[in-house]
């Protein structure tokens, strides 16, 4: 029997809890933090994907109009130039301080990389544990419990579609 995984109830209640619903129940729709029940037919994943693509195209057009309007405003251009100068000045100050700190700053950068690698390892272990059907949870030094959150993203593949003759 297939099950559908939901994070939260769409009303902001229990956002970190997992709920399971059989696929034959009403369809779920993303809204704000969670999911709500809607209609009685299941939406097709491809249909939702296509709707997202259409909305993104419309957003792109509207964003271009917005940028054009901003670029026509004199004060906007002037402010942007000031911001660019301030960013350059900020970068020079940061570089100077990094050089003054020397080994301490190098250690900071090493620790950043180490933490990123360990977070990726933790994610892999959590996913494996979940797939084994076990509870996934960690506890910090203050006895606070942490539950994972999962995200599904779609990435364009590099496959070239061949037309059938």
Image: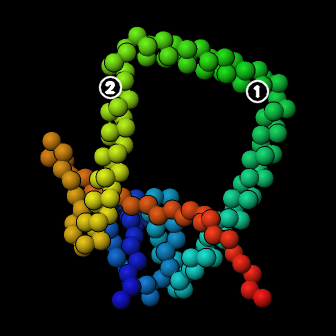
Residue 55, image x and y in percent?
69, 62
Secondary element under disc 1, as helix, strand or loop, is helix
Which residue carries the number 1 mark?
Answer: 76
**Mark 2 closeness class: few <14, some 14–19, many ≥20 residues within 10 Å:** few
What is the C-alpha distance between the residues marked 2 and 1?
40 Å
First reached walking from the N terminus: tag 2 or tag 1: 1
Task: Say which of 11 and 7 sits in front.
Answer: 7
Taking the image as shown, residue 47 lies to the left or right of residue 113, namely: right
Residue 28, image x and y in percent?
49, 74
**Mark 1 closeness class: few <14, some 14–19, many ≥20 residues within 10 Å:** few
Quadrant assignment, res 15: bottom left
Tell me which residue sits at (76%, 27%) in the image: 76
Quadrant (top left, top right, bottom left, bottom right) of the C terminus? bottom right
Taking the image as shown, residue 22 lies to the left or right of residue 158, namely: left
Q: In the image, which disc is placed on residue 148? A: none
Tell me which residue sits at (21%, 66%) in the image: 135
* Vertical position of residue 28 compared to residue 23: above or below: above
* Vertical position of residue 2 compared to residue 30: above or below: below
Which residue carries the number 2 mark?
Answer: 107
* Vertical position of residue 76 compared to residue 136: above or below: above
Quadrant assignment, res 5: bottom left
In front of the other: label 2 or label 1?
Answer: 2
Viewer can see residue 17: no
How many dots with numbers?
Answer: 2
Secondary element under disc 2, as helix, strand or loop, is helix
Quadrant (top left, top right, bottom left, bottom right) of the N terminus? bottom left
Residue 148, image x and y in percent?
31, 57
């Amino acid at each position: 029997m297939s099950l559908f995984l939901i994070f939260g109830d769409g009303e902001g209640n229990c956002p970190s809890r997992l709920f399971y619903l059989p696929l034959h129940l009403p369809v779920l729709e993303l809204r704000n933090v969670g999911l709500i029940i809607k209609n009685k037919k299941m939406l097709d994943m491809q249909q939702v994907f296509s709707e997202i693509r259409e909305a993104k195209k419309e957003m792109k057009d509207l964003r271009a109009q917005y940028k054009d309007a901003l670029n026509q405003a004199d004060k906007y251009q002037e402010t942007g130039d000031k911001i660019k100068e301030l960013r350059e000045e900020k970068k020079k100050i940061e570089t100077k301080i990094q050089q003054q700190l020397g080994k301490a700053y190098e250690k900071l950068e090493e620790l950043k990389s180490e933490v990123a690698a360990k977070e990726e390892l933790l994610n892999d272990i959590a996913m494996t544990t979940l797939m084994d059907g076990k509870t996934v949870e960690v506890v910090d030094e203050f006895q606070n419990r942490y539950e994972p959150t999962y995200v599904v993203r779609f990435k364009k593949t590099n496959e070239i579609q061949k037309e059938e003759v």
